[in-house]
Amino acid sequence: MEYIYYLANASLTLRVVEHLHNSYWLSARFITVIHQIDGWVIKVKLDYPLTPQQDGDFRAFLNELGIPYEPEIRVRMVLWGLETGQSPVDVMRRYQVAVVSHGTPDRTEIEEFRKQFVQGLGYCPETLA
């Protein structure tokens, strides 16, 4: 099972990562986190199908934080490239997309990206709050 959502800021993205980390019944094969100028795209791919109740609960959680997202072709190609084993650096270079994290859910990668981005700008845009 996979879920692709659009989130408004880094705090919401971090909440999803924490939820995945703390929910033993959600065994994520990988999570991909992409930063865009106007928000964040996350793709969660699970190791196994959820029960209808678990699926509904997880979708309800994600719907509280963001909206289901149908990626444009460029983002779809990024997600496909990462899933087929291409390196995040190669994918970022090819498609000009900021892949913040791909693989095991890890909040430190998101926090470090946010810190470096804000430091480079000198202020904190709303999407990085």
Image (cartoon, rainbow, N blue to C red):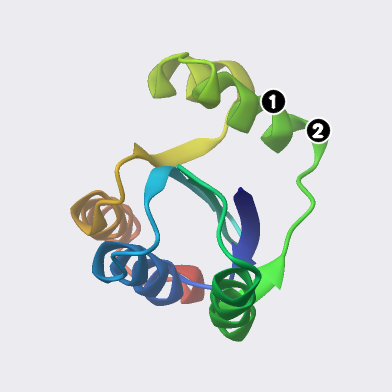
CA–CA distance in space, label 2 to label 1: 6 Å
Residue at (69, 25) in percent of width and height: 77
Numbered mark located on residue 120 in the image: none
The residue lying toward the viewer, choosing from 73 and 105, is 105
Residue at (63, 25) in percent of width and height: 80
Q: Are marks 2 and 1 in contact (CB under 8 Å)?
A: yes
Q: Position of residue 102 (x, y in %)?
A: 39, 37
- Identify whether 57 is placed above or below 1: below
Residue 109 relative to residue 10: left or right:
left
Q: Secondary structure at mark 2?
A: helix
Q: Badge 1 local density, few (<14 within 10 Å), some, or many (20+)?
A: some
Q: Secondary structure at mark 1?
A: helix
Name the kind of residue labelled 1 in the image: Met
Residue at (61, 68) in percent of width and height: 55
The residue lying toward the viewer, choosing from 50 and 40, is 50
- Identify whether 48 is placed above or below 79: below
Residue at (48, 72) in percent of width and height: 9
Label total for image: 2
Numbered mark located on residue 73 in the image: 2
Q: Position of residue 89 (x, y in %)?
A: 40, 20
Name the kind of residue labelled 2 in the image: Ile
Q: Which residue is mark 1?
A: 77
The quarter of the image holding the C terminus is: bottom left
